[in-house]
Image (spheres, grey):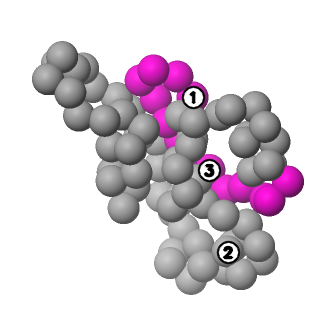
């Protein structure tokens, strides 16, 4: 699912065929499914946040942080 959401942030284009991006999953790499679900049960959401033209990070976000990102026009996808 993370890679599908990354494709939303970086749509496929013939002109970008030689361009690569980095999707950082450090935040969830060591977590179990139960731990990830526990975060959502507490009201947080998991996001794929675009930090620049070639990099995005998986991040845990509260609703407050999510609202700030929306207000700041940060590019992200909800996972």
Instruction: Please report the residue visible at 18 percent of the width from the left and 16 percent of the height from the top.
Output: 15
Alpha-carbon distance for marks 3 and 2? 12 Å
Alpha-carbon distance for marks 3 and 1? 11 Å
- Asked if residue 2 is positioned above or below residue 21 in the image, the reply reads below
Residue 9 shows up from this direction: yes
- Mark 2 Cα shell of 10 Å, populated few (<14), some (14-19), many (≥20): some
Instruction: Please report the residue visible at 85 percent of the width from the left and 54 percent of the height from the top.
Output: 64
Q: Which residue is mark 1?
A: 51
Q: For the stretch drawn in magenta, what is the main secondary structure? A: strand
Q: Which residue is mark 2?
A: 40
- Asked if residue 63 is positioned above or below residue 76 in the image, the reply reads below
Q: What element does badge 1 sit on?
A: strand
Magenta highlight range: 51-64
Alpha-carbon distance for marks 2 and 1? 23 Å
Q: What element does badge 3 sit on?
A: strand
Q: Quick check: 77 left or right of 66?
A: left
Q: x%, y% of residue 72?
A: 75, 31
- Mark 3 Cα shell of 10 Å, populated few (<14), some (14-19), many (≥20): some
Q: Quick check: 32 left or right of 11?
A: right
Residue 13 in magenta? Answer: no
Residue 35 shows up from this direction: no
Contact check, label 3 and label 1, Cβ < 8 Å: no
In the rendered image, which quarter is residue 14 located in?
A: top left
- Mark 1 Cα shell of 10 Å, populated few (<14), some (14-19), many (≥20): few
Q: Which mark is residue 59?
A: 3
- Asked if residue 78 is positioned above or below residue 52 in the image, the reply reads below
| Extreme-right residue of the structure | 64
Q: x%, y% of residue 26?
A: 52, 48
Which is nearer the N-term, disc 2 or disc 1? 2
In the rendered image, which quarter is residue 13 located in?
A: top left
Q: Quick check: 7 left or right of 18?
A: right
Contact check, label 2 and label 1, Cβ < 8 Å: no
């Amino acid at each position: 699912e993370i890679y599908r959401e990354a494709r939303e942030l970086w749509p496929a284009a013939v002109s970008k065929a030689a361009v690569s991006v980095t999707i950082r999953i450090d935040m969830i790499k060591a977590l179990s499914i139960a731990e990830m679900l526990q975060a959502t049960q507490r009201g947080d959401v998991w996001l794929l946040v675009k930090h620049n033209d070639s990099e995005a990070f998986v991040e845990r976000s509260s609703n407050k942080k999510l609202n700030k990102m929306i207000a700041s026009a940060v590019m992200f996808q909800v996972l």
